[in-house]
């Protein structure tokens, strides 16, 4: 007969939470880990070469640490319960186990923070360690939002018509629990915002960071998780500087873009990690103004089934898009769609675009995708939603593309634009070679003068369209070298 004490003990043991699946130490000190649907993530400051130990509650036989360009070789312990490696610089790492990537560790190495503000610093909105639920945080000219290490802030940030705002720190901005914005319509209007100061005062916006006409803004160092829609929307915001942020929307809904640069120019995005279920970094032009001089560099990207890793499009309207540079970027996974893409669904001319030193580790659908298209996002799309649905291509090379008859295609040509003078330089494809597509609309609306220079697959040079698995149509001037 089981005693009452034994019965209570067994009951408490059955109800006890399971121990964590992973434990990490950096330089002998424990690293705080946070769950997300695809595994866990944590942050560690890297001021000097640091020994990292990872222990798992399962048998470890193989470990992949991405990006591969970091050159990290883990050493698995004899008991197959842990492994070690040295991290020499603050790289955002993704750690995969036993050939699977459905359950990973994202370990974000950060450089030491310089000159963090104090809580009483003027013009600083300061959030210290702990959980905060401020709702909508609206920044004014020259204000700083600071998320200290250990801060977990459930809210969204907006700056409209401002200059010189700053968002920085080592804390986390969390969108879990924030409802997605729904399209307004006769039966479905945006609800009014809650009273100021309310914990649920998100207003009409749902972007985790929304900048509109916010010139010379700086966003640095923070981690953004669980966005319900586009994560970082910079619209008509020139002079933007983004450095060292991490965006993690793994297993989120479609439309959880990472960074959307919309009708903005003179922007620099660098040293970022982005995992989203739509475009990681995308240039758009909803306001139909010239877009120019944007640089995205030193990024690590994971693109889930919706969207593309590096994208220009779809919504480009009629003004030109020019002088865009994507450089020194690791694309560690593209689950579907394209590693690099230009999707011109409107009448804009997209020109003088460079993709330089792009390393593609695991992309399964498309590698390079430059196309002029008729899409559900353009101003000449059908006004009737039922007709849009009927025209939608159910499973072709592109998502969001509308089918048309030859007669309709000729009539739609006046709304199409151009893609020209594109350089893809020193692209390395490491694990799997997907197909690529260069597709103009017709001879007058073409993809022109694309140069593919130094493309390799598993170290082997690719010097022609057939070896690279390219589908080419209305694309004069394609050159391999």
Image (cartoon, rainbow, N blue to C red):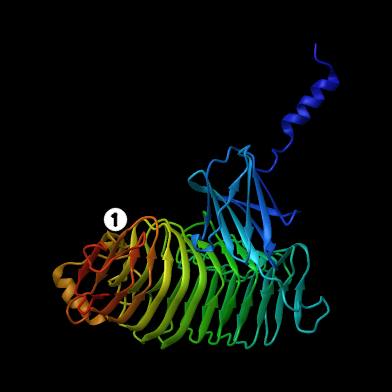
SS label for mark 1: loop
Residue at 73% x, 33% y is 15
Q: Position of residue 388 (x, y in %)?
A: 30, 64
Say whether residue 367 is left or right of residue 224: left
Say whether residue 460 is left or right of residue 33: left
- The quarter of the rendered structure image containing the C terminus is bottom left
Determine the image quadrant of residue 121.
Answer: bottom right
Q: On the image, numbered disc 1 is attached to which residue?
A: 395
Q: Position of residue 447 (x, y in %)?
A: 25, 77
Of residues 468 and 278, which is closer to you in this image?
468
The answer to whether residue 177 is seen in the rendering is: no
Tally of marks: 1
- The quarter of the rendered structure image containing the N terminus is top right
Determine the image quadrant of residue 70.
Answer: bottom right
- Give the residue at the far left of this rendering: 407
Of residues 422 and 62, which is closer to you in this image?
62
Residue at 56% x, 72% y is 271
Residue at 59% x, 59% y is 226
Residue at 59% x, 73% y is 209
The answer to whether residue 369 is seen in the rendering is: yes
Q: Position of residue 27 (x, y in %)?
A: 73, 57
- Give the residue at the far top of this rendering: 1
Q: Is residue 150 above or below residue 326?
A: above
Say whether residue 144 is left or right of residue 230: right
Say whether residue 263 is left or right of residue 2: left
Q: Position of residue 368 (x, y in %)?
A: 33, 67
For label 1, the crowd category at 10 Å Cα-Cα, with few meaning under 14, some 14 to 19 and many 20 or more, is: few
């Amino acid at each position: 007969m089981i005693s009452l004490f034994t019965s209570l003990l067994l009951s408490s043991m059955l109800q006890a939470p399971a121990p964590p699946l992973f434990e990490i130490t950096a330089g002998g000190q424990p690293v705080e880990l946070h769950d997300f649907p695809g595994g866990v993530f944590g942050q560690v400051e890297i001021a000097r070469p640091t020994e990292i130990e990872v222990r798992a509650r399962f048998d470890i036989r193989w470990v992949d640490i991405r990006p591969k360009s970091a050159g990290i070789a883990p050493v698995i312990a004899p008991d197959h319960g842990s492994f070690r490696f040295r991290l020499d610089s603050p790289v955002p790492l993704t750690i995969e186990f036993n050939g699977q990537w459905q359950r990973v560790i994202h370990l974000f190495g950060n450089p030491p923070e310089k000159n963090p503000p104090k809580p009483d610093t003027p013009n600083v909105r300061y959030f210290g360690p702990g959980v905060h639920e401020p709702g909508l945080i609206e920044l004014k000219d020259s204000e700083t939002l600071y998320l200290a290490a250990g801060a977990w802030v459930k809210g969204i940030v907006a700056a409209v018509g401002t200059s010189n705002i700053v968002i920085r720190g080592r804390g986390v901005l969390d969108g879990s629990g924030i409802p997605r914005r729904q399209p307004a319509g006769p039966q479905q209007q945006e609800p009014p915002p809650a009273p100021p100061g309310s914990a649920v005062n998100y207003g009409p916006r749902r972007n985790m960071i929304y900048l509109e006409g916010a010139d010379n803004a700086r966003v640095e160092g923070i981690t953004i998780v669980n966005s319900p829609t586009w994560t970082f929307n910079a619209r008509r915001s020139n002079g933007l500087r983004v450095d060292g942020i991490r965006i993690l929307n793994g297993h989120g809904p479609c439309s959880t873009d990472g960074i959307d640069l919309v009708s903005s120019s003179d922007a620099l995005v660098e040293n970022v990690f982005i995992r989203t279920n739509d475009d990681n970094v995308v240039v758009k032009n909803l306001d139909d103004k010239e877009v120019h001089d944007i640089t995205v560099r030193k990024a690590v990207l994971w693109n889930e089934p919706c969207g593309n890793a590096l994208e220009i499009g779809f919504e480009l309207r009629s003004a030109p898009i020019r002088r865009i540079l994507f450089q020194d970027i690791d694309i560690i996974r593209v689950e579907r769609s394209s590693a690099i893409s230009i999707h011109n669904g409107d009448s804009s001319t997209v020109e003088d675009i460079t993709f330089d030193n792009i390393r593609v580790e695991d992309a399964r659908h498309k590698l390079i995708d430059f196309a002029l298209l008729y899409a559900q996002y353009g101003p000449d799309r059908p006004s009737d939603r039922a007709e849009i649905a009927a025209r939608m291509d159910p499973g072709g090379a592109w998502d969001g593309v509308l089918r048309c008859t030859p007669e309709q295609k000729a009539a739609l040509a006046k709304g199409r634009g151009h893609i020209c003078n594109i350089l893809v330089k020193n692209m390395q494809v490491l694990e799997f070679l997907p197909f690529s597509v260069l597709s103009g609309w017709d001879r007058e609306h073409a993809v022109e003068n694309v140069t593919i220079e130094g493309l390799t697959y598993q170290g082997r040079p690719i010097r022609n369209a057939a070896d690279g698995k390219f589908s080419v149509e209305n694309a004069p001037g394609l050159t391999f070298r």
